[in-house]
Image (cartoon, rainbow, N blue to C red):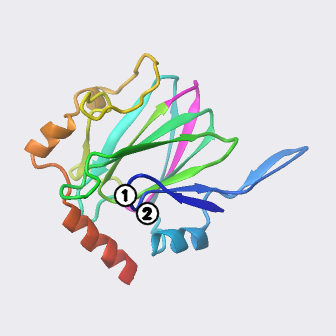
């Protein structure tokens, strides 16, 4: 398993070894030992999610109140997706920074998104499947969204006709979410990460 920290500290790309043969291939997208070595604590699995998207579908940017927030470990098992992360932790040295990773079942990369970092994806092909491991269950009162189309973020989105849910289409910009007091604080996130590392 190769591991690379992205432009946002605490966000990691995991690239597992892929074993093809005449039957197909075998891959292990999540490996706890490699995860703990990179992140500093085990991944607490509370829920798994599976989404299938048409070409151009945008999901996100999504985040949750911290604590406890919701960490995600995501990978693509069919099709291809542009995975997007944005640092929205108020007070973070990299606040507003974004990074992207192409996810597909060829390289089988995965991305770890810690609590307090916004996450989204864009389907590059029809019938693209994203699998999520989530550290907490669904909490509708503590979950929020930001617009992936916020021009101030300058995300490198593909030139596809965007397909969004009504909720994601109505999501605020980063500046609007900050004005509404929706964004997590960097201090609260750091305290939560320390809590997780302490076990």
Residue 28 sits in quarter: bottom right
Q: Quadrant of the N terminus?
A: bottom right
Location of residue 115 with respect to 95 vertically, above or below? below
Label 2 close to label 1 by CB (< 8 Å): yes
Query: Element type at marker 1?
Result: loop
Q: Earlier in the sequence, mark 2 or mark 1?
A: 2
* Residue 67 visible (yes or no): no
Relative placement, left or right, of 1 versus 46 is right
| Residue at point 52%, 23% (across, down) | 55
- Counting other residues with Cα less than 10 Å from the Cα at mark 1, is it few (<14), some (14-19), or many (20 or more)? few
Would residue 21 be visible to someone looking at this image? yes
Q: Magenta includes 30?
A: no
Assign a secondary structure to mark 2: loop
Disc marking residue 46: 2
| Outermost residue, right side | 22
Q: For the residues marked 2 and 1, what is the alpha-carbon distance in whole angstroms?
A: 6 Å
Label 2 crowding class (10 Å Cα cut-off): few <14, some 14-19, many 20+? few
Residue 90 appears left or right of 195: left
Residue 21 as seen in the image, left or right of residue 52? right
């Amino acid at each position: 398993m190769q591991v690379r920290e992205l432009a946002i500290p605490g966000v990691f790309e995991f690239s597992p070894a892929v074993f093809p043969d005449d039957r197909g291939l075998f891959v292990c997208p999540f490996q706890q030992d490699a995860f703990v070595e990179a992140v500093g604590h085990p991944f607490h699995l509370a829920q798994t999610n599976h989404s299938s998207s048409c070409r151009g579908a945008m999901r996100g940017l999504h985040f949750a109140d911290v604590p406890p927030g919701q960490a995600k470990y995501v990978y693509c098992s069919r099709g291809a997706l542009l995975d997007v992360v944005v640092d929205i932790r108020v007070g973070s040295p990299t606040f507003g920074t974004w990074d992207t990773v192409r996810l597909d079942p060829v390289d089988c990369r995965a991305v770890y998104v810690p609590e307090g970092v916004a996450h989204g994806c864009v389907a590059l092909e029809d019938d693209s499947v994203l699998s999520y491991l989530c550290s907490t269950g669904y909490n509708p009162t503590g979950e929020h969204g930001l617009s992936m189309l916020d021009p101030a973020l300058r995300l490198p989105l593909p030139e596809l006709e965007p397909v969004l849910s009504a909720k994601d289409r109505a999501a605020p910009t980063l500046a609007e979410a900050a004005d509404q007091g929706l964004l997590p604080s960097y201090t609260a996130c750091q305290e939560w990460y320390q809590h997780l590392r302490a076990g």
